[in-house]
Amino acid sequence: MAKCIMIQGTMSNVGKSLVVAGLCRIFARRGYNVAPFKSQNMALNSFVTGEGLEIGRAQAMQAQAAGIEPSVLMNPILLKPNSDTGSQVVLMGEAIGNSTALEYFKNRRSYMPKILEAYKELSKDRDIIIIEGAGSPAEINLRADDIVNMGLARELDAPVLIVGDIDPGGVFAQLVGTLELLSEDEKSRVKGLLINKFRGDIKLLKPGLDELYRICQKEVLGVIPYMELDIEAEDSLAGNFGRECSDGFYDDKKINIAVVKHKHISNFTDFQALKMMENVNLYFTDGLHNIKSFAEMPDALILPGTKNTIEDLQDHKESGLSDYIREFAKRGGVVIGICGGFQMLGEEIVDEEGVETCANNLSKGLELLPVRTILKKDKKLRRVRGRAVPDNKTTKVSYLYGKEVYGYEIHSGVTEVINGRKNSDYDAGSFAELEKEDGEKYQDGFCDGNVIGTYIHGIFDSDEFREALIRALCEKKGIAYEPGNSASYEAHRYRQYDILADGIEENIDMSRVCEIIGC
């Protein structure tokens, strides 16, 4: 069995996911076979593994940092919120139904055997497992039957490091308060503390570190500096989307790409590759009031995935954003819909099986693509690879013709062309030709002029596709294309993992961490 260490936090968003990723990278560079593990993740950012199963996107990111293929064993339970009080439960990569928070927490201990089985299987051929907790171990209302923090640490006999975030202030209170709310057995598992996101002179912090040790008798193993990293946001509901609309957000010297921030937005990590591009000004907008007028019209507008397509579409209709999107497309703006965003672009969405919470049986779409989506309870999960717009060189986005695309599909529903509409009323055709693992080819998405719909998450990770899109938008706007360091997104991503690992390794006591692990 692998040796292990568990990273817990004083609260959500203190940086647990990145600390785990950094430690995975450090140990991988030292020659260890290391893997991440999180028993239960709550996130709308998810990923499809090579096994064709669904896990939290953060665990996929951590696996990449470790230099290994993501596996469902790394995240046996994924909760995908579909309302304020309920979630879809994904167990070992497959959806098993919806559950209210009360129902789930009442029964969650029953999932422990699956969690331990997954951990045991993962650890068979590993040297080290870096385990991530969730939220805080001091949530005393959830202590009974815990399966993700101290309850799991007890089952695995895992030593624990607790991370506090100094950036918003109050880190000493965070750490002391967390420890005070732990039982004596739980406190004994805590082998050290980490302070994250520090800015300033460490000498000013030293008196506080000494006093902290005097109060709680736990050593601070390191103070990790605040780092400007281009790594996917943490897998939480806090909505760490990145730059959002504000006064002066529009940049007429760059390609402005607006991403619509649905209420139930999912997989907002799809746009990480665009953020790194020299020519791109990427921002999120949550409504018509801050998307600006047509005088400052974005060069492209993206409708991302969503856990509740119909409800979010209704919100856009009520806010007037739907009318803006239609007019934007009419004026020649490039519109790209991904997954739920693709479904919105069609003529109608049918939900006779009641797949979505609070959804009506039928909803009229944006009517920008000649397609209809029928929502189904069965979820489609698969990794895909292929070529863009193989059958329509005359479309207004012909510059994408033949470009490689790849990614993964996660959707409940079938989208089909409405009979008799393909070539008569639209300058339209399939968006991409993809190939399944067995070699069978099939068509994905739809393209009509400057409007594109696709089910491919992660499509902008493809260097060929992303570069062709941004080059064409630059040419249309009359500005020079500047690739900068964005020629290879994969190389860029691994540079970021190394920067993260360097920042952690240089600022924490790694010899003590190794001693705690026993490696």
Image (spheres, helix red, strand yellow):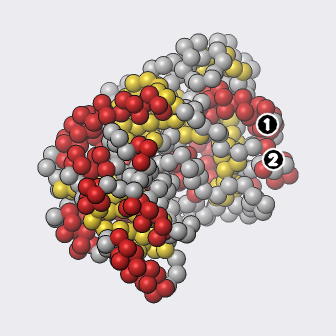
Element carrying mark 1:
helix
Determine which quarter of the picture holds residue 512.
bottom left
Looking at this view, is 284 or 487 the one in front?
284
How many marks the image carries: the answer is: 2
Q: Which mark is residue 445?
A: none
* Residue occupying the far bottom of the picture: 203
- Image coords of residue 331 (percent x, y): 81, 40
Circle number at residue 319: 1
Question: Which label is found at residue 289?
Answer: 2
Amino acid beneath label 1: Ser
In-front residue for pair 182/407: 182
How many C-alpha atoms fall within 10 Å of the one at disc 2: few (<14), some, or many (≥20)?
A: few
State if disc 2 and disc 1 touch (CB < 8 Å). yes
Q: In the figure, 274 relative to 199: above or below? A: above
**Would you say 71 lies left or right of 128 here?**
right
> Which badge, 1 or 2, comes first in the chain's sequence?
2
Q: Quadrant of the C terminus?
A: bottom left
Foreground of the two, 50 or 197 = 197
User: Neighbour class for label 1 at 10 Å: few (<14), some, many (≥20)?
Assistant: some
Whether residue 129 sits left or right of residue 181 in the image: it is left
User: Residue 46 location in percent, x, y?
Assistant: 45, 41
- Would residue 394 be visible to someone looking at this image? no
As drawn, is 143 to the left or to the right of 172? left
Tell me where residue 275 appears, x and y as whole percent.
58, 57
Helix, strand, or loop for circle 2?
Answer: helix
Residue 157 x %, y %: 20, 52
Q: Is residue 157 left or right of residue 69?
A: left
Q: Amino acid at mark 2?
A: His
For the residues labelled 1 and 2, the Cα–Cα distance comes to 9 Å
